[in-house]
Image: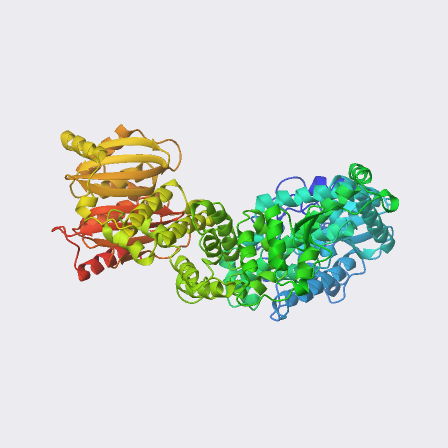
């Protein structure tokens, strides 16, 4: 009844601190107020100019006034005749003194009681506000000590507010109950009473505690319940029950708190078979909504998978006595996440749990770390520890619950071969030498001797992955003591590594298990440098180490396309091993890959191939999307780097696996077709076919001849739309004249068509433009409308530039993402017959139109163009010549590149 009484006035949750709906900040109850805003005749003056952190703020239109209350007796009176609650500045949170402590109200005296209790000014808000301010902003401390000290300080203050009472207790629950109070955390408090007092007395007791907390500006998650009501609420709400597991006595009758804790734990253990699956589903649903913490550039430290919520769930599982989480490193990981959260609260001044990009450097500095990348690595490592512990724990919970079911017991009795009590040991199925399957896990055989078998970790991992089974945590811990592998590795060890990598998706969980116990770093010491390393490019969805494993997973699906799948899989695992080191990561990675290959026991020829694959793993994708495939110089770029057809075949598969593992934006049918075309040309050249001159290689197809003739016959543009497997293709044929490229690109931008890729070439005096486009929203315009607008753009009656400028101005107030400045470079030896300008910039509406105008203004001729959009970035290549049809001189090319970059804002 009392809880409902408060909630009806406050619209605040009464949960136990483990989640629940977010309340509106600043919304406070008052059973003496009418609904709606406070009347202007009696404003609450607030604290204009108050400099106390966590203190109240001024309210309504009379902010800053100093009107004296005219009520009789020198005290303000409520409009209904009852005494109004004390002015908040009389409680010692007014304008601060020079020493930073809040100044008491002018009518207050040291030691003078402010209400009916025995509390003094220094015992309530005045002392608490000053001590809290000093603790959070003046004393150089952090970590568990800060949270414990803040909780201790708050305990004393709330206990003083409650005062001496009978039949009631103030109980901290949730994070506050654990004594882990972050600077901006809610105060999760339960007022527990025995129900003997009437509703008015209980409400007054609650007001005596709640109102000063709100006046301090602190967030409060509260409830008022009897023990029976608390038990009923826990039975109906899992989050309430989780909060009660951390209940801690603050003040009042300790027997009430002790009885509440005892009941909460007894009910939790009795109901665990039903509650734990519900808790697991809650965790999985939260992970689907917030993602995996260790792979997010802006992770939610609390809600994402591997965050603080999951750590709390593991404590609840342990409290059920059904299963326990691996303890090694778990507490350290949880404290690291809490420390990062504390630093985030202090940096932002808000109760925020999302570690945004703009706050990461400040949080890193507060934690004594050199930069944001170092912070993310520490946070990712902590989240990995929590995630791995959760995986093991939930697997064990499932095993225990299955074993407890009557059907499982019956199956084991009927299928047994005798033994004590009719039961037999679980069946053990051999998987490999020293490895067996037991109860859905790969475990070590009784005869296994890790200290005498250095290949056992790789053999067990390969057997588990090939069988699609997780590695038993106990087995992994035993294998930590395995003898080190000799150098170079024996052939069996190398073969088992390839078998593990070729297992596909099951290899990920097995690799994570090895990594959690440090076995991967023992096998490959170079792995430690990329472990949990973030990738700032938004196209990447994984950290560097996970990306390498995912690339091996993708490569396993392509193993049938190559003659040496072992080299493909090892190259996939090592292709980004140089990231995070000085210089180009491909060059640094090549040296590392050669060392690793020799240590693994590969021969000199295979080692050279692996080094080439790592060095040039970006070659095919970059060349195919940024160069003219019909230019012999483009093909020579590939053949000079890749000496044999077998290496080209491996590089082709590695390119696809790398792109697929990067993310959906990195690989699509269009890119695949470009890479395939480049590989076909390079393979023909390596087989001995001569590289034709550009004029011969560039001979137009019959379809292109037909479109060119149609445009010449019409004396104007011809536009068609085609639905292709790779997307929607807009085909334009326009008689060659200045301004065609900017006009065509501008028309597409006006119709809100995003250009994914484009190619431009000249056939018999006609410019052929092939565009791969997608509509920002809505449907595609008709071809006739695009043609009409293109005609108007070419004759100047449409005003493309002006219309795009108007649209840009309309969106000028929108917040734009921070991006790297654009770069325009001249590709050295990009072509023998043209100057190749390469443009890298942030994608924007009308960008290609502006680049086309700049090229026209420079008086150069665009012979061909290759446009590609990678996520939010563009990488475009323009083959330009002078009016004489030849490549530009070096100084003119450099000047054009500088002008283009300046136009783009670089």
Q: Percent position (x, y) of residue 772?
A: 33, 39
Using the image, determine if residue 805 lies above or below residue 787. Answer: below
Looking at the rendering, in which quadrant would you find the N terminus? top right
Q: Nearer the viewer, residue 663 or 379?
A: 663
Q: Percent position (x, y) of residue 875?
A: 33, 50
In the image: residue 435, left or right of residue 541: right
Q: Percent position (x, y) of residue 755?
A: 33, 41
In the image: residue 874, left or right of residue 864: right
In the image: residue 624, left or right of residue 829: right
Q: Nearer the viewer, residue 695 or 324?
A: 695
Looking at the rendering, in which quadrant would you find the C terminus? bottom left
* Scheme of image coloration: rainbow
Quarter location, residue 284: top right
Using the image, determine if residue 650 lies above or below residue 784. Answer: below
Residue 155, can we see it?
yes
Question: What is the count of numbered marks?
Answer: 0
Using the image, determine if residue 224 lies above or below residue 534. Answer: above
Q: Nearer the viewer, residue 257 or 841?
A: 841
Q: Nearer the viewer, residue 904 or 775?
A: 775
Residue 183, can we see it?
no
Q: Percent position (x, y) of residue 81?
A: 74, 45
Q: Give the residue drawn at x 83%, y 49%.
A: 260
């Amino acid at each position: 009844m009392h809880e409902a009484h408060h909630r009806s006035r406050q619209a605040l949750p009464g949960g136990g601190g483990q989640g629940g709906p977010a309340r509106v900040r600043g919304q406070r109850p008052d059973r003496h107020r009418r609904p709606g805003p406070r009347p202007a005749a009696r404003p609450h003056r607030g604290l204009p100019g108050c400099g106390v952190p966590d203190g109240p703020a001024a309210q309504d239109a009379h902010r800053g006034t100093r009107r004296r209350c005219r009520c009789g007796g020198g005290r303000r009176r409520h409009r209904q005749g009852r005494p109004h609650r004390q002015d908040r500045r009389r409680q010692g949170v007014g304008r601060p003194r020079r020493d930073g402590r809040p100044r008491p109200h002018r009518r207050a005296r040291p030691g003078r009681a402010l209400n009916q209790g025995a509390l003094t000014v220094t015992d309530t808000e005045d002392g608490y506000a000053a001590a809290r301010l000093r603790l959070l902003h003046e004393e150089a401390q952090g970590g568990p000590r800060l949270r414990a000290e803040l909780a201790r300080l708050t305990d004393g203050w709330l206990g003083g507010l409650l005062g001496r009472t009978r039949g009631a207790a103030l109980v901290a629950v949730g994070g506050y109950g654990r004594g882990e109070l972050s600077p901006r955390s809610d105060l999760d408090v339960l007022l527990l009473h025995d129900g003997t007092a009437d509703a008015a007395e209980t409400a007054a007791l609650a007001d005596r505690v709640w109102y000063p907390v709100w006046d301090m500006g602190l967030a409060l998650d509260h409830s008022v319940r009897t023990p029976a009501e608390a038990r009923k609420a826990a039975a109906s709400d899992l989050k309430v029950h989780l909060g009660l597991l951390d209940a801690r006595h603050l003040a009042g009758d300790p027997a009430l708190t002790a009885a509440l804790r005892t009941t909460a734990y007894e009910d939790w253990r009795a109901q665990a078979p039903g509650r734990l699956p519900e808790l697991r589903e809650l965790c999985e649903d939260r992970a689907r909504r917030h993602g995996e913490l260790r792979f997010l550039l802006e992770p939610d430290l609390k809600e994402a998978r591997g965050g603080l919520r999951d750590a709390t769930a593991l404590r609840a599982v342990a409290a059920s006595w059904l299963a326990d989480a691996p303890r090694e490193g778990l507490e350290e990981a949880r404290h690291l996440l809490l420390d990062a959260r504390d630093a985030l609260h202090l940096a932002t001044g808000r109760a925020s749990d999302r570690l945004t990009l703009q706050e990461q450097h400040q949080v890193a500095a507060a934690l004594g770390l050199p930069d944001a990348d170092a912070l993310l690595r520490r946070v990712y490592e902590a989240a990995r520890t929590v995630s791995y512990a959760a995986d093991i724990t939930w697997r064990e919970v499932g095993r225990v619950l299955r074993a407890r079911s009557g059907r499982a017991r019956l199956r084991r009795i009927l299928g047994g071969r005798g033994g004590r009590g009719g039961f037999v040991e679980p069946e053990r199925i051999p998987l490999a030498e020293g490895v067996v399957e037991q109860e859905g896990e790969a475990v070590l055989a009784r005869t296994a001797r890790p200290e005498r078998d250095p290949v056992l970790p790789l053999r067990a991992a390969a057997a588990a992955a090939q069988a699609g089974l997780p590695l038993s945590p106990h087995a992994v811990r035993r294998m930590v003591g395995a003898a080190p592998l000799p150098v170079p590795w024996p052939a069996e060890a190398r073969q088992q590594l390839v078998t593990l990598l070729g297992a596909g998706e099951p290899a990920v969980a097995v690799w994570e298990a090895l990594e959690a116990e440090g076995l991967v770093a023992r096998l490959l010491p170079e792995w430690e440098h990329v472990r949990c390393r973030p990738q700032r490019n938004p196209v990447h969805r994984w950290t560097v180490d996970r990306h390498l494993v995912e690339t091996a997973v993708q490569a396993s699906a392509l193993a049938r396309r190559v003659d040496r799948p072992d080299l493909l899989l090892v190259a996939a695992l090592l292709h980004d091993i140089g990231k995070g080191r000085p210089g180009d990561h491909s060059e640094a990675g090549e040296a590392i890959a050669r060392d690793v290959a020799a240590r693994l026991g590969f021969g000199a020829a295979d080692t050279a191939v692996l080094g080439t694959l790592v060095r040039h793993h970006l070659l095919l994708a970059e060349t195919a999307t940024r160069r003219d495939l019909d230019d012999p110089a483009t093909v020579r770029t590939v053949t000079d780097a890749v000496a044999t057809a077998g290496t080209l075949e491996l590089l082709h598969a590695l390119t696809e696996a790398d792109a697929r593992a990067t993310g959906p934006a990195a690989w699509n049918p269009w890119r695949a077709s470009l890479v395939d075309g480049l590989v076909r040309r390079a393979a023909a050249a390596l087989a001995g076919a001569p590289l034709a001159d550009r004029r011969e290689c560039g001979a137009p197809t019959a379809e292109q001849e037909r479109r060119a003739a149609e445009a010449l016959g019409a004396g104007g543009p011809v536009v068609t739309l085609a639905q292709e497997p790779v997307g929607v293709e807009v085909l334009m044929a326009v008689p060659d004249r200045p301004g065609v490229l900017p006009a065509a690109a501008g028309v597409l931008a006006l119709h809100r068509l995003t250009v994914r890729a484009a190619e431009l070439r000249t056939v018999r005096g006609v410019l052929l433009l092939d565009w791969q486009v997608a509509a920002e929203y809505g449907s595609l315009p008709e071809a006739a409308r695009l043609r009409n607008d293109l005609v108007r753009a070419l004759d100047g009656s449409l005003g493309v530039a002006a219309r795009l400028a108007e649209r840009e101005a309309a969106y000028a107030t929108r917040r734009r993402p921070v991006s790297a400045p654009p770069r325009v470079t001249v590709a050295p030896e990009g072509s023998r017959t043209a100057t190749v300008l390469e443009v890298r910039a942030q994608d924007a509406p009308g960008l290609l139109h502006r680049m086309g105008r700049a090229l026209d203004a420079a008086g150069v001729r665009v012979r061909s163009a290759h446009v590609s959009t990678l996520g939010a970035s563009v990488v475009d290549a323009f083959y330009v010549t002078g009016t004489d049809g030849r490549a530009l001189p070096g100084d003119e090319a450099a000047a054009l590149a500088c002008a283009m970059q300046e136009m783009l804002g670089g």
